Image: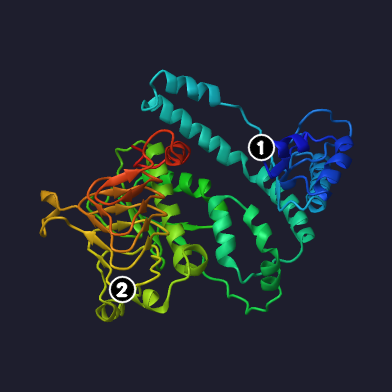
Amino acid sequence: MLREIRELGFEYAELSHGIRISLMPGILEAVDAGEINISSVHNFCPLPMGVDRPAPNIFKFSSENPRERENAFKHTLKSMETALRVKAPLVVLHMGSLEMRDYTDKLLDMVGEGKRQMPKYEKLLEEISIKREAKKERPMQYALDVLRRLIPLLGPPRTCECPRLLANAARHGNWLAIRSRLAELRRGLRRWRLPRLPGRRPAVLFTGRDSAQRENLMMHVQGRLAPLGLSMMEQPAGSGFRVVFDGPPDLDHPDAVVVHGEQPLAAMIVHVERAILRWLECRVERRYPDAVVGSNPLGARLLQTPGIGRLVGLVLNCRLDCRIRSPLLLPVPMGIVIERGVQLGSRVTVMHQVTIGRKDPVVPREHGGNLAVIEDNVFIGAGAKVLGPVRIGRGATVGANAVVTRDVPSHCTVVGANRILGHDEPSVAATRREEEHTVVNT
C-alpha cells in the first residue's frame, strides 16, 4: 500500500489508527528502504491486541475508569515508540470526551428551521454550556494526569537557534521542511542559553456597566479560554486587555473591545474571544518578533519603537503614522510612508519606497477619507502605492511599483495599475480562497 502511495507522487504518509500489528514489518521495511516517509502516527498505532477495526477512542484519557486510563497510557507509549522507529515527528492523540447528552442534532434542526436568533435557541445553548462547564473538571484532570506521565518520557525541552524555521513550519502546518535542516537544528540544540524568567500571566478585565449579563459573559469566556491560563477579573489590576460592556461605540483602543447588551450571548462570546486571541497573537509577535515575523535590521526595529521611531524616521526618510499592533517586516527601511488610520494585520512585509495612504487630499473619515486595510501575511513590493479605502486580502502579494486603488482578493497578486492575477477559477489562488476563509474572498 505504501508503495502505491509513493507511485502516486506522495512522499509522506500518516500511519493511521487502523494499522494492525501484522502490517508493521512491511511498513518498517518500506521506511528503512527510503520508499516512503512517515509524517505522523495516529494513536493507537498499531492496534491493541484483540481490536480488529480502527478505534482511536477505545481507551480514553478522560475515562472515569482507572484501568482504561492505564491502558490508554500504555498503548500511547507504543504509538510513541512506533513514531520513533519510523522517524515521525508527530503523534496525534484523542484526549477523550465528556459524558453528557448529545444536543448536536437538536441544535442543527433548530438552525435549519431558522430559529438560531430566537430566545429558545439561545437559552438551550446557554443551558448546554452550563452543563458542560459543570462536568468538565474531572475528565480534564484525568486527561492532564495521563499527559503529565507521558511528557517526561519525551525528554527535557530544548531551545534552538533556528526559531524562524520552526515558526514557519508551525504557521503553515507543514513540518516536513524541518527534515532538510536537521543538522543545523541539532547544532542549535546543543548551544547553551540563559534561562528566561517567568512572566506575569496576561490579564483580561471586564468593565463597563455592571450587570448579570456581563458576569455571564465573563463566565463563558473564562471557561472556553481556560487552556490559555488567562487571569480574568472585574477589578482593575495593572495593564491588560479590557472588555467594555455597553461602552462607547467609537472606542478605538488596541487593547480593548466593546460589546453591547442587546447582542445575543453567542455573538458576544465570539466577538470577545476573537478580540482576545488577536491581542494575544500581537503580544507573542511583539515579544518574539524574529521567530514569528522575521529578522528586521536595526533601523527597522528602531523605526517601530515608540518614542524614538519618529526621530529615526527623519534619518531614514520614513513616516509610520499608523498604529502598529504587530511588528512589520521591513528588510530595507527607506522611504516608507504609512498614513494614520491604515490598519495593518500580522506578518506584513513592506519593502522600500512604499506608500500606503489617501488617493485624494486629506478628507475627513465621514466624507470618504477611510484608508487601507492590510490583512495578515501580505507582501508589498518596492515602490508600490496602495491608495484609498481598499482592502488587501490575506496572503496577497503587491508587486513592485504597482498602484492599487481597488480591493485585492486573498492569495492573489496585483501588478501594474490594478491588474490582479490569480482571480480566475483554475488558479492556485482561487483554490486557496476556498480553503482559507477571509473577508476578501470575492
Residue 212 in sight from this viewpoint: no
Closer-to-camera residue (367/230): 367
Tell me the SS state at disc 2.
loop
Is 121 left, or right, of 337 in this rendering? right
Is 91 left, or right, of 242 in this rendering? right
Residue 314, position as x, y percentages in the image: 24, 79
Quick one: label 2 or label 1, which is nearer the N terminus?
Answer: 1
Amino acid type assigned to the residue bearing label 2 in the image: Met
Looking at the image, which residue is at 29% across and 38% down?
Answer: 262
Residue 255 vs 32, above or below: the answer is below
Whole-Å distance between the Cαs marked 2 and 1? 54 Å
Residue 58: image quadrant is: top right
Closer-to-camera residue (299/192): 299
Residue 263 in sight from this viewpoint: yes
Residue 62 vs 237, above or below: the answer is above
Residue 423: image quadrant is: top left
Identify the residue under disc 1. Answer: 97
Residue 380, position as x, y percentages in the image: 34, 58
Identify the residue under disc 2. Answer: 334
Closer-to-camera residue (395/74): 395
Image quadrant holding the N terminus, namely top right
Residue 281, position as x, y percentages in the image: 46, 58
